[in-house]
Image: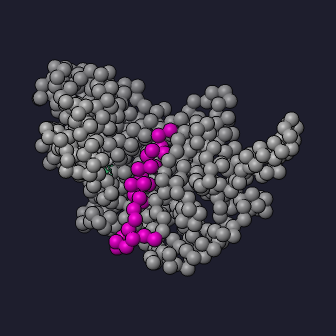
């Protein structure tokens, strides 16, 4: 049995989970519940009152965090300690948004100057491209950017750029290619002119098959349309921690933006991986994004647990996962620009905490990372909210809403807000049988039918949700919100005692895939593997004779 399960605080929480009153009752007994369970910081307001919590539960959760030495673990991360123990690396995505005067050391060397130098290199590049000084091989200015990358080298740039659409430059368009499916690249290239297109190849390892294949094909397209090998330097830049491989690939040394092994892919948008973001919104706004995240870092480091937004969000989510068996967590963004954000948080959290051994290699005997999913509100209300309200499982929800719209239009925004708040209220209070029956009282249904329908209209409620508000979606509030979720993930991993910063689970599929690629390309039929893999391989070969 792991230390966590043996904890007295853990066992207290198990008891509390059985006896907590329905949220309806807790709200009716405490008219100030919102004031008691809401928090403001970094331009964000978190309403966490619609959760299955009371003072005693929170106190036990804070005690569990203290017992897990959370404060010490937070300090270790910010200090650059080697906390990614299986890869022997520090975890310092926070250094990417640190003040230029900070002194943050890795192996005794202050890394902040190099971070700042890379930001300056990014600024110069962004200026030259957006101001028209950077010219293509026929002397034309750049009109289209193609960002090639996958995972954190795709999701961060694409989703953050989309979220900040109101801040985009007028002169550039940006296209994102991640999947190795030829359709993804072909559909973009068919619309582009190689004279005015600039490719950004983003790969921390510079060994990701999809990204290498897409970049090679993009280069073939570039050369097949009138350009020469010598022109590649004007149309291809790279972001990687593997400068040698990038140079070997043919990227001009001046066009390689460094990143570092102490930045995980899913934490890398703040680095030069964010180059597409900076090109689209401008370097000043990109620095605002960094500043917002840095403000949340300061809050996370300094605020006591009881007033710490990432800690509170993490503990309440852990409470529902480990003590109410919630298997997933839904993120509902009531803002069209944020429609991609759930997918970003999916990689951030699931690739970090989808683990089943503790740091010392002991099998966990408790639930760790939940499935993170979600989408755009109000669309989800017409797709999957039914299950949130009346399904058999518990799915805690985060509702995100900017109070001001970038596109005020009549009643639209107030209706969006009414839906957002209505959903959280319905999840919390549900609908009793008597209330459902009363709604049917005027109907022509028989008593027996009214009874049956009322049973189907019953909603248990007591479904937990957070509501996260900001005045407006800006680079600063977006940066603070993403950092909030990064630290939320950190806190959960720290309490579950897992390594949130490696990803050994993604290797096997890649390696087996490479072996199967060889068999797919071989002349002979495949008989060496299991019958399913053999059959699938041979069916594909049959279809490509
Ligand atoms: O999925 C594994 C992973 O390493 C992610 O963590 C990363 O964001 C993605 O693949 C791409 O990796 P790279 O930036 O090295 O190409």
| Tally of marks | 0
Q: Is residue 472 above or below residue 326?
A: above
Q: Is residue 35 left or right of residue 508?
A: right
Q: Residue at x 66, y 49 (%)?
A: 390
Q: Nearer the viewer, residue 540 or 205?
A: 540
Residue 206 falls within the magenta-colored stretch: no
Q: Residue 22's image quarter? A: bottom right
Q: Is residue 43 above or below residue 198?
A: below
Q: Position of residue 160 (x, y in %)?
A: 43, 41
Answer whether residue 81 is visible to the viewer in this image. Answer: yes
Q: Position of residue 5 (x, y in %)?
A: 50, 75
Q: Residue at x 75, y 57 (%)?
A: 24
Which quadrant would the N terminus be assigned to in this image? bottom left
State the scheme by which the image is colored.
Answer: one colour
Q: Residue 381's image quarter? A: top right
Q: Position of residue 406 (x, y in %)?
A: 56, 33
Q: Is residue 76 left or right of residue 295?
A: left
Answer whether residue 46 is visible to the viewer in this image. Answer: no
Q: Nearer the viewer, residue 277 or 11?
A: 11
Q: Residue at x 44, y 49 (%)?
A: 346
Q: Nearer the viewer, residue 539 or 60?
A: 539
Q: Residue at x 81, y 42 (%)?
A: 449
What's drawn in magenta, residue-wise?
Answer: 339-365
Which quadrant would the C terminus be assigned to in this image? top left
Q: Is residue 306 above or below residue 442?
A: below
């Amino acid at each position: 049995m792991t230390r966590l399960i043996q904890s007295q605080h853990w066992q207290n929480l198990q008891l509390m989970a059985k006896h907590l009153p329905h949220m309806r009752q807790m709200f009716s007994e405490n008219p100030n519940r919102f004031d008691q369970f809401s928090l403001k910081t970094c331009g964000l307001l978190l309403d966490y009152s619609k959760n299955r919590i009371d003072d005693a539960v929170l106190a036990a959760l804070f005690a569990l965090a203290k017992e897990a030495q959370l404060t010490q673990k937070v300090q270790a991360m910010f200090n650059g300690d080697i906390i990614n123990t299986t890869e022997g690396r520090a975890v310092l995505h926070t250094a990417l948004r640190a003040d230029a005067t900070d002194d943050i050391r890795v192996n005794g060397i202050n890394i902040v100057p190099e971070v700042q130098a890379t930001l300056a290199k990014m600024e110069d590049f962004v200026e030259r491209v957006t101001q028209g000084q950077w010219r293509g091989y026929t002397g034309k200015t750049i009109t289209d950017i193609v960002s090639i990358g996958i995972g954190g080298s795709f999701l961060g740039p694409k989703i953050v750029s989309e979220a900040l659409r109101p801040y985009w430059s007028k002169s550039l368009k940006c296209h994102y290619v991640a999947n190795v499916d030829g359709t993804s690249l072909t559909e973009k290239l068919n619309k582009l002119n190689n004279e005015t297109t600039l490719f950004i190849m983003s790969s921390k390892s510079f060994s990701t098959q999809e990204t290498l294949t897409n970049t090679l094909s993009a280069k073939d397209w570039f050369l097949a349309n009138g350009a020469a090998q010598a022109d590649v330097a004007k149309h291809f830049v790279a972001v990687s921690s593997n400068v040698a491989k990038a140079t070997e690939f043919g990227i001009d040394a001046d066009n390689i933006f460094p990143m570092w092994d102490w930045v995980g892919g899913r934490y890398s948008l703040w680095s030069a991986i964010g180059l597409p973001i900076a090109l689209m919104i401008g370097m000043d706004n990109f620095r605002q994004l960094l500043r917002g995240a840095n403000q949340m870092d300061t809050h996370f480091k300094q605020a006591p647990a009881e007033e710490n937004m990432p800690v509170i969000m993490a503990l309440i989510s852990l409470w529902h996962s480990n003590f109410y068996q919630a298997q997933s967590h839904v993120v509902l963004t009531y803002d069209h620009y944020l429609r991609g954000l759930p997918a970003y948080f999916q990689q951030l959290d699931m690739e970090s905490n989808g683990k089943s051994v503790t740091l010392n290699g002991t099998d966990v005997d408790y639930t760790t990372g939940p499935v993170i999913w979600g989408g755009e509100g109000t669309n989800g209300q017409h797709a999957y909210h039914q299950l949130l309200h009346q399904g058999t499982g518990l799915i805690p929800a985060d509702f995100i809403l900017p109070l001001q719209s970038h596109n005020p239009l009549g009643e639209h925004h107030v209706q969006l807000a009414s839906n957002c708040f209505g959903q959280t209220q319905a999840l919390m209070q549900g609908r009793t049988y008597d209330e459902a029956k009363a709604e049917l009282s005027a109907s022509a249904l028989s008593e027996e039918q009214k009874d049956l329908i009322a049973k189907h209209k019953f909603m248990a409620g007591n479904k937990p949700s957070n509501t996260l508000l900001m005045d407006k979606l800006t680079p600063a509030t977006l940066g603070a919100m993403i950092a909030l979720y990064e630290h939320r993930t950190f806190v959960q991993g720290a309490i579950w005692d897992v390594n949130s910063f490696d990803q050994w689970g993604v290797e096997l599929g890649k390696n087996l895939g490479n072996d199967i690629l060889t068999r797919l390309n071989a002349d002979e039929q495949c008989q060496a593997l299991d019958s399913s893999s053999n059959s699938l391989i041979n069916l594909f070969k049959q279809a490509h004779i």
